[in-house]
Image (cartoon, rainbow, N blue to C red):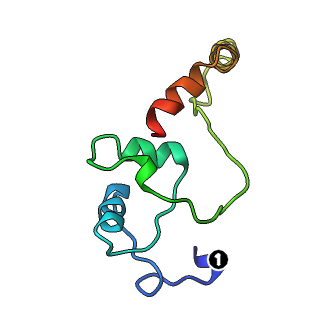
């Protein structure tokens, strides 16, 4: 935000938890929140609001990055097994099934 010329306390108000801004947007105290579809949907999971109550207005970055972080000493064989399991979830369509439950 800063690199785009936005200033704290003038254009945006930092918060310690994403949920604070989600409450503010539904109370019409702020106009925008940012986050990925899955992050926002997950954060709204225990709320009276749903992800579909939000409207996307613009894309901040045209890339998605989902990562699993592991300790630098994690054996390569375990990392390979994790990657293979994740690839299998994608091929079986399970990732999309999980996402569709949140993005309602």
Camera-side residue of 33 and 76: 33
Left or right, 30 with respect to 38, comes to left
Looking at the picture, how far across and down is residue 96, in whole percent? 59, 27
Camera-side residue of 44 and 6: 44
43 versus 99 height, above or below: below
Looking at this rendering, what residue extends furthest in the right direction?
Answer: 62
Camera-side residue of 98 and 54: 54
Image quadrant of residue 5? bottom right
Residue at x 43%, y 48% (from the top left corner): 51
18 versus 6 height, above or below: above
Please tell me how crowded label 1 is: few (under 14), some (14-19), or many (20+) other residues with Cα within 10 Å.
Answer: few
Left or right, 4 with respect to 41, comes to right
Left or right, 79 with respect to 19, comes to right
Residue at x 62%, y 17% (from the top left corner): 89
Quadrant containing the C terminus is top left
Image quadrant of residue 75? top right
39 versus 12 height, above or below: above
Return the residue at label 1. Answer: 3
Looking at the rendered structure, the secondary structure element under dot 1 is helix
Looking at the picture, how far across and down is residue 7, in whole percent? 51, 84
Residue at x 58%, y 65% (from the top left corner): 57
Looking at the picture, how far across and down is residue 47, in whole percent? 27, 47
Residue at x 33%, y 72% (from the top left corner): 28
Looking at the picture, how far across and down is residue 1, in whole percent? 58, 73
Total labels: the figure holds 1
Image quadrant of residue 92? top right
């Amino acid at each position: 935000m800063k690199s785009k010329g936005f200033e704290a306390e003038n254009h945006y108000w930092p918060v310690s938890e994403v949920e604070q801004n989600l409450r503010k947007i539904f109370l019409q105290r702020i106009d925008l929140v940012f986050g990925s579809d899955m992050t926002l949907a997950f954060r709204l999971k225990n709320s009276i609001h749903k992800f579909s109550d939000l409207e996307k207005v613009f894309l901040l970055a045209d890339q998605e990055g989902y990562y699993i972080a592991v300790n630098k000493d994690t054996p390569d064989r375990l990392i390979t097994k994790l990657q293979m399991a994740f690839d299998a979830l994608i091929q079986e369509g399970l990732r999309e099934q999980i996402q569709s439950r949140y993005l309602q």
